[in-house]
Image (spheres, rainbow, N blue to C red):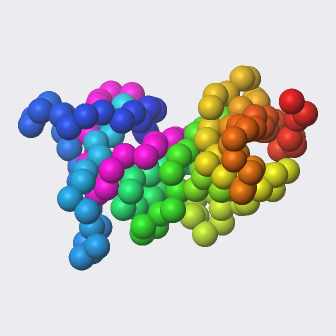
Amino acid sequence: MICGAEYIEQPYSGEYDEKIYDIKSPWNSSDWTWIKFSEEDKVWCGEFRGKYRGVSSSKKLGIVVVLTSDYMYMLDICTAELIEYYSQPQYVEMTTSPLEDIFITDGYGIEMFTNSKIEDLETIVIPVHPDNLKFVEWMGNILKITCYEFLIWGKEIELYLDSLSMEWLDN
């Protein structure tokens, strides 16, 4: 079972056992992302097509999600097999809560994984129309987010999402 997943630069040949997750398509870029996976008894490396955008894992959901410019890959946390993928994702960033909920953003909204199916992503209703939304940090179960209000530039807004109640907190 995968216990940890972290982005690394291209490793030296032979440094790790490697598994290539390549999806055949004429639209693939020439970029690659390397993720180092830790299991109880070994460390290995996965290669994913596209430029790195994020990686998150959740034992609760039984998945590891790798986000690149070309694809969003969903792996089974126990077998490391590809469950499903999404081509040309619009998503730019992801984060995992302390409760192992995985949140993802395209810069204009937030979605949350509810199970191991990409089609079942749940949209989180945001109290403003955000633009350039970014996940900043976790403060316990509170996710700090920054953004601008759509079409109103010049003042960055801070938002706080309680991941337990899924309610927005007042600043």
Residue at position x 61%, y 41% in the image? 134
- Would residue 108 appear left or right of 13 to someone viewing this image? right
- Would residue 161 appear left or right of 52 to someone viewing this image? right
**In the image, residue 144 above or below residue 23:** above
Region of the chain picked out in magenta, as a range: 39-61
- Would residue 160 appear left or right of 65 to someone viewing this image? right
Q: Quadrant of residue 58?
A: top right
Q: Residue furthest bottom?
A: 26
Q: Where the C terminus falls, by quadrant?
A: top right
Residue at position x 72%, y 23% in the image? 139
Q: Compare residues 143 and 152 and report the one nearer the observer.
A: 152
**In the image, residue 77 above or below residue 30:** above
Percent x, y of residue 114: 68, 55
Residue at position x 88%, y 35% in the image? 169
Q: Residue furthest right?
A: 170
Q: Compare residues 146 and 57 and report the one nearer the observer.
A: 146
Percent x, y of residue 137: 64, 28
Q: Where the N terminus falls, by quadrant?
A: top left
* Residue 51 in magenta stretch: yes
Percent x, y of residue 130: 72, 52
* Residue 44 in magenta stretch: yes
Q: Tally the numbered discs.
A: 0
Q: Quadrant of residue 8?
A: top left
| Dominant secondary structure, magenta | strand
